[in-house]
Image: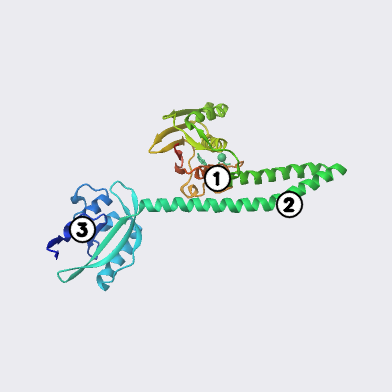
Amino acid sequence: MKLKIQSIDIDFHQIVENSLNAIWILGTEGEILYFNKACMKLLKLTSPEDILSKKLYTFLPPDIHAPCKERLIKVIETQAILESIEAKMIRSDGEVIDVEVRTVPYHLKGKVYAQVIMQDITQRKIAEKLLNDREKLASLGQTAASIVHEVKNPLTSVKGFLQLLKESQSHSYLDTMESELEKALETLQNLLLVSKPNLHDEPFVSIALGKELESLLFLFQEKLCNMKVELNVRDAERTVVGKRSLLLKAFFNLIKNAIEAIPDKGMIEIEHYYENGWVHIKVRDTGVGIAEDKVKLLGTPFFTTKSDGTGLGVTQVFTTINEHGGGVSVQSVVGEGTIFHIRLPAE
Ligand code: ADP
Ligand code: MG
């Protein structure tokens, strides 16, 4: 269609072809009658033949075929403009992406089709999740800290009275009670430390993590005899700014978990490198792995699958790395192993 504005011919086809949004014209069965260049980019396709003669469903996860069909029928039959929704699409490389979809009627030669406009919102979803995780952690930390204060005070006073009692009486139970109380107080203190790393008055200093990782590994020397350990430090001179003991504790926790994940023989690989303003550290193990439904529980205080675990190690890692403006991502396959990928802003 051409429109004349101030004697310039506007070619709408060109505008649509070069739009950043993916635009499709579809029939009720999802048959593709038109698509613009952005559709190919969205799906990482290189030639138009990859789309021609296909139905849109080819690129949708099976669970949204039915709702998609419903929307197409609705827009074509009622000619209503539908509310935008979020959906998923499968790229040619198998990656599943998030898209925002708007569906409107499209009239052509007396017939009605559906015009579907899509925007890739994968990055936005990742950012939202990160923010959400951070907020969850922060509020978890606050709740944990306030519970700890409430519970610690009465326990400390019980401990005081117990000590007074021990001065005047002796009973074997009293010692047991005292040591159990100490354990409870220690757990509470640990919870406070991991959920509120900011409580530490440690100063921020320049840290070359690449060099620190080597000395950290020495601490595990005895435990590492059954394992192959590879430390691959590139860009060792790069530094981050942070609280040294907190950051080292975080990497200590990651290495400890990697070792504990390997039941018999296996391999641990620690990688350090700099890229695009970030210092990256990957801790990879060939251990038992983490089931998919458990991955999202990582970072929750007291989540543990070990009989003698505390479930506070990963919480400390998440809170510390977040407090330092970094990020943590976890990839794991049961029976194959786990990778913890940490990034921290480089100095
Ligand atoms: P803990 O080690 O005391 O159990 P953590 O907070 O350090 O507590 O870890 C929580 C849980 O996360 C572990 O019990 C384990 O199930 C899982 N986990 C953490 N790191 C790994 C890893 N590298 N491989 C497999 N599972 C892991
Ligand atoms: Mg641990």
* Kind of element beneath mark 3: helix
Residue bearing the label numbered 1: 315
- Please indicate, yes or no, whether residue 311 appears anywhere in the rendered image: no
Q: Is residue 268 left or right of residue 57?
A: right
Some atom of ligand 1 lies within 8 Å of the CB belonging to the residue at label 3: no
Report if the beta carbon of the residue with label 1 is closer than 8 angstroms to ligand 1.
yes
Q: Amino acid at mark 1?
A: Thr
The picture places residue 105, in percent across and down from the top left corner, at 24, 68
Residue 326 in the image: above or below residue 209: below
Q: Amino acid at mark 3?
A: Val
* Label whose residue precedes the other's in the sequence (3 or 1): 3
Q: Which residue is mark 3?
A: 16
Q: Quadrant of the N terminus?
A: bottom left
The residue shown at (16%, 72%) is: 110
Q: Residue furthest right?
A: 168
Q: 204 and 279: which one is in front? A: 204
What label does residue 48 carry, if any? Answer: none
Q: Which residue is mark 2?
A: 154
Label 2 near label 1: C-beta < 8 Å?
no
Label 1's element? helix
Instruction: For marks 3 and 1, give the one nearer the viewer.
Output: 3
